[in-house]
Image (cartoon, grey):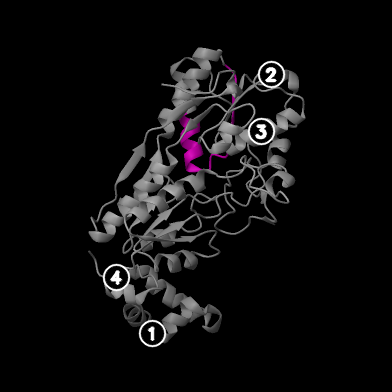
Amino acid sequence: MARRPTVYDVAKLAGVSTATVSFAFRRPDEVRDSTREAVLQAARELGYVPSGAARGLARGGTGVLGLQSFDLLTESDILSPEAQHPNDGPPDPRVFPLYVDEVQRGFELECRQRGRSVHISNDPRTPQDVTDHAGRVDGLAVFPSRAGLSGVAGVLESVVRTVPIVLFSMGGVSADDAFHRVQADNDGGARALIAHLVDHHDARRLTFLGDLAAPDYQERFTAITDELATRGLAPPAAPLTTSPHTATGDHTATDDTASEGLPAANDAADIAAIITDISVTDLPDAFVCASDQIAIALIEQLTRRGVSVPADVIVTGFDGILASRVLHPTLTTVRQPMADMGRTAARILIEEAEKRSGSGRTVILPTALVLGESCGCESITAA
């Protein structure tokens, strides 16, 4: 396993003291801009990450694995504000748990069984926040950000040289084979869904909802288009989505980690805006949504307009979150093995922490088509 670069290595390359290196990361406002940039450049070149657990690293590891979630919609209003923020009682099952929660649960369970602790960080404001997180752990699992990792790709590509990283998506960073990747079978799941809609419901006119800037959404849309083409059917038109600068929660995303290509169309306001110009008399045969969250918000807005699902239009999702099973109508969706994804990521990081392989591996886990009332079927898992 390659030796971790130290603060002394960075200080030597940047031509500064070790104290200055520490200040550049911990108190950047107290260091001249030119000096701080020289330190950060040296750190990038060496693949250095500041250690928050130096004593543990001296023994060869911290015993901790990290999970970086990048504000994956857990703060977003995918339904009305009163549904998202009830005055009391348990969380609304339509908004919790989400995809990220179920993957995280699998990750934590595997770590617990293997005697590892978990350090969770979300919504970093700067690339240095990611670097700091990496310095506290033996390995890092990373969810795709709402910007497809565009704002932190560079720092991840540097950090992976010394800290193993698992990505829960194929896209967002370079095709560097040092990264490990764990994801569900987007292609197979999307094709199975289209086969069901065409063969069992004679659906021909499909509309896709989701922003293709999100790598998983792009894979699903491509599979849908290809499957329709193999059946001699016209592909769906350009996906319906909102502006990439969609307001989320109480702020508008404008920073590097969340400003480009947001997987929009997630909250009630987005969906209402998207379907405003769609005539009730000219609905497609089916709305194929890139995620369950989008589908849930869409059904709510269609119902408000007096459109019945599935009598007037079919709606499908992708993920298989708990909400899809308690929704009325229950949602036809593609179930990702979310807990298994988390467990697999943890196993890879533990193995890599013990013996660094030097090359990444890709694990694609199978999906399952789950039939629900939103397409006109009874709620079952298709074979």
The stretch in magenta equals: 204-223
26 or 371: nearer the viewer? 371
Q: How many marks?
A: 4
As measured in the structure, the alpha-carbon distance from the residue carrying label 2 to the one carrying label 3 is 13 Å
As measured in the structure, the alpha-carbon distance from the residue carrying label 1 to the one carrying label 2 is 67 Å
At x 52% / y 80%, what residue is drawn?
27
Q: Residues within 10 Å of mark 4 (few under 14, many from 20)?
A: some
- The label nearer to you, 2 versus 4, is 2
Q: Which residue is mark 2?
A: 312
243 or 315: nearer the viewer? 315
Q: Which residue is mark 4?
A: 4
Which amino acid type corresponds to the residue marked 1 in the rendered image?
Thr
Which amino acid type corresponds to the residue marked 3 in the rendered image?
Leu
Residue 168 disc label: none
Asked if the magenta segment contains residue 218, the reply would be yes
- The label nearer to you, 3 versus 4, is 3
Tag 3 and tag 4, C-beta contact below 8 Å: no
In the displayed image of the protein, which residue is found farthest to the right?
305
As measured in the structure, the alpha-carbon distance from the residue carrying label 3 to the one carrying label 1 is 54 Å
Marked residue nearer the N-terminal end (2 or 4) = 4
Q: Residues within 10 Å of mark 2 (few under 14, many from 20)?
A: some
Marked residue nearer the N-terminal end (1 or 2) = 1
At x 55% / y 45%, what residue is drawn?
97
Q: Residues within 10 Å of mark 1 (few under 14, many from 20)?
A: some
Q: Which residue is mark 1?
A: 18
16 relative position to 255: left or right: left
From where the camera sits, is residue 221 visible? yes
271 or 139: nearer the viewer? 139
List x then y, in percent, for residue 138: 34, 63
Asked if the magenta segment contains residue 77, the reply would be no
Which amino acid type corresponds to the residue marked 2 in the rendered image?
Asp
